[in-house]
Amino acid sequence: MNVFKNFLSKHTILSYLIALAISYILFSAVILGFLDRLLFYPDHKYHQEVEESLQKIIAPFRTVKNDVFIPVQNKNRIHAWYFNKPSAKVTFLISHGNAGNICYRLQLIKTLLPYGSVLVYDYEGYGKSEGEPSRKAICEDGLAAYDYLVKQQSVKPEQLILYGESLGCAVSCEISKSRKVGGMILQSGWTSLLNAARDKYLLLKLYPDCCFAPPYFNNIDVLAKAHPPVLLIHGQQDKILPCRYSQELFLKACEPKQLILLPHAAHNDIGVVDGSLYTQGIGRFLRTYYPNACL
């Protein structure tokens, strides 16, 4: 009888373990399949009403808004605005965050235009860009935008500064891994996508890295190796991606590096809250490493 009970007990435990394993696998497929959907919040609408505001921003500068469509290697085209200042000594390539589209980046354009030319583009599936966003696609989009500036607009790589905003920090870091750049400004970024995802969704801590498809967007790995001058910017009231991410990035990054922490700013109001501290910090970074940009 005891042998029979032991057999049943072992059989029950084994059944539970098998059921748990099957549930784990099935749940993994559900959770991990939604990772990209959790990451991207595109606005497909092009907001025509921004044109008047945009014209007021660019009026003081010798530039116009050039609407361009840049082909990507997967045959889709991404939409971009290019503000070319003939006398500019630097060009900023803006990779924006995971929500909205370029119509929401007027404040950023206004901040950077005094220092140089600006190109801001939409990822696939955002605004007027074709296709659908994915982690792989946005990396290809960033490289296509870079190649457009260097190959078609004759921008020198050493004069090209990548500006990454939130998710765009990861795209900028990915660009820097395979293309030469003059510098990077990384605003409101994370240490790695997996770290940020696990902090936000605790269930993801149950799954090892191998369960996730690359790219992992590990910004620490990029900055821990040799890189051009980098400026890290983060709002200390950021509840979406806490400022400790940029603090950790700064701690582990190689020189040359600078860090700006904005005491009152959150995630979506950078440049509006603590605006003077923000613009002064960017100016200081550019004067340090690109003095010609501030002439």
Image (spheres, rainbow, N blue to C red):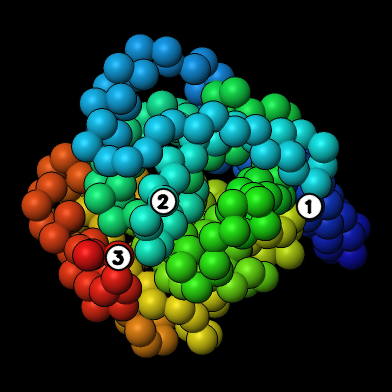
Question: Residue at left 65%, top 46%?
Answer: 141
Residue 57's quadrant in the figure? top left
Residue 273's quadrant in the figure? top left
In front: 256, or 16?
A: 256
In front: 33, or 288?
A: 288
Asked if the residue under mark 2 is in contact with the one under mark 3, i.e. CB atoms within 8 Å, the reply is no
Residue corresponding to mark 2: 86
Drawn side of residue 143 relative to residue 17, left or right: left
Query: Distance of mark 2 from mark 1, alpha carbons?
Result: 62 Å
Residue corresponding to mark 1: 21
Q: Secondary structure at mark 3?
A: helix
> The disc labelled 3 sits on which kind of residue?
Ala
Q: Secondary structure at mark 1?
A: helix
Q: Residues within 10 Å of mark 1 (few under 14, many from 20)?
A: few
Query: Distance of mark 1 from mark 3, alpha carbons?
Result: 58 Å
Query: Distance of mark 3 from mark 2, alpha carbons?
Result: 13 Å
> The disc labelled 1 sits on which kind of residue?
Ala
Label 1 or label 3, whichever comes before in sequence order: 1
